[in-house]
Image (spheres, rainbow, N blue to C red):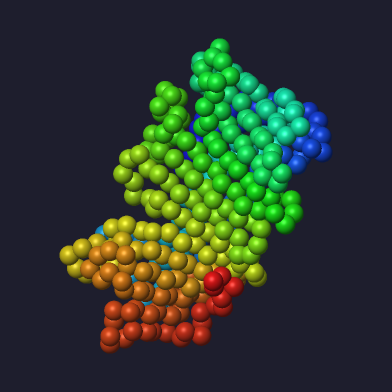
Amino acid sequence: MRYPVLACLCLAMSACGGDFSNDDLEFLNALPQREDLAVKLPGGRQKGAGQRLSPDKGALAVRLGEASQLVGDTDETGQEFNEGVDGLLSFLEAIRQLPPTRREPDRRIWGPYRDNNHPGFDTRFVMTRAGERFDYQLEYRRTNQGEDAWWAFLVGAFQADAGIRKGTGDISLETGRARGKAFTTGMEALDRLEIHYQTQALPTRVELVFDYALPALLPAKYVFREGAGSVVEMTFEIGGTDLVPGGQPEDVALTTRWAPDGRGLGSLEVLRGDITGAKYTECWDRLGRVTFIARSWDFFTPTEGDRTTCPDVSALDP
């Protein structure tokens, strides 16, 4: 998911520059940075080590020693996750390069600027502070309209705790509101994007939620967590997967956990379909090759391989 409107605004703002006060930096440190929100999956596997789960074939027909399809699906989903926040983070990074246009004791304003890519609109970025809480908005209005005409396209908040950039935050991109204002974003399939994150304690957590205006094949919710020892987890749902032969496709929830060396453990839970409630577990080595399989619905061979090959990812347990 790209954000053309934010990318264009970044280009317009990047030509500016200047000095910052120490108080300015306190505001800017409340904005999330790329390393706060990005999915960080371990490397070291062969390119193409896994194939993405597909609705047109048995998704779990993998055998011991073959490339894990859960690895391939998580790798691609991690890329989608990072693309989902990339444009937004690029915009916030551009803001951090600019001194505020207006300073008040607990408020900073960047702009207003004329948006050359949206003729007839002005834009500004506003941050307020109340104790350890910071709220910010990217706002638009029709040119020459008054102060009460501003409306928020991007809304964010950060509650600081346990040091600089440590705390909890929320960001929403209000694309549905923008359409109602006749403001073109290039994201017609989306009504709203939400990001929720906490960086104050391990395991850290980032949740990405898409509210689609039109039907979409991509998951609507992704969750990424990172625990002690750089153990990471990715959770999302997959719809319409032909998990087992039968009359109905399966909707499944997939959770994968990874050790730093690339070994991992994945679990699928069937939410709807021919085998609702069934669970599948799989482990793989650092090259993404399956080493252990467990299928709750298979009474003859419920497990295959060596369970001791599964990495210790207990740092992410509740």
> At which x and y percent is residue 108?
70, 31
Q: Is residue 318 above or below residue 166?
A: below
In the image, what residue occupies the spot 52% across and 27% down? 151
Q: Is residue 205 above or below residue 15?
A: below
- Tell me the quarter of the image containing the C terminus: bottom right
In the image, what residue occupies the spot 75% across and 28% down? 103
Q: Would you say 303 lies left or right of 297 here?
A: right
Q: Residue furthest top?
A: 144
Residue 116 visible somewhere in the drawing: no
> At which x and y percent is residue 275?
26, 71
> At which x and y percent is residue 131?
71, 44
Q: Would you say 210 lies left or right of 34 here?
A: left
Residue 179 visible somewhere in the drawing: yes
Q: Is residue 151 above or below residue 236?
A: above
Q: Quadrant of residue 6?
A: top right
Q: Would you say 182 lies left or right of 10 here?
A: left
In the image, what residue occupies the spot 60% across and 55% down? 198
Please name whichever residue, 122 or 159, is drawn nearer the observer in this view of the structure.
Answer: 159
Q: Quadrant of residue 182?
A: top left
In the image, what residue occupies the spot 51% across and 82% down? 309
Please name whichever residue, 189 or 307, is drawn nearer the observer in this view of the structure.
Answer: 189
> At which x and y percent is residue 39?
56, 56
Please name whichever residue, 25 or 13, is drawn nearer the observer in this view of the structure.
Answer: 25
Q: Residue furthest left?
A: 247
Q: Quadrant of residue 17?
A: top right
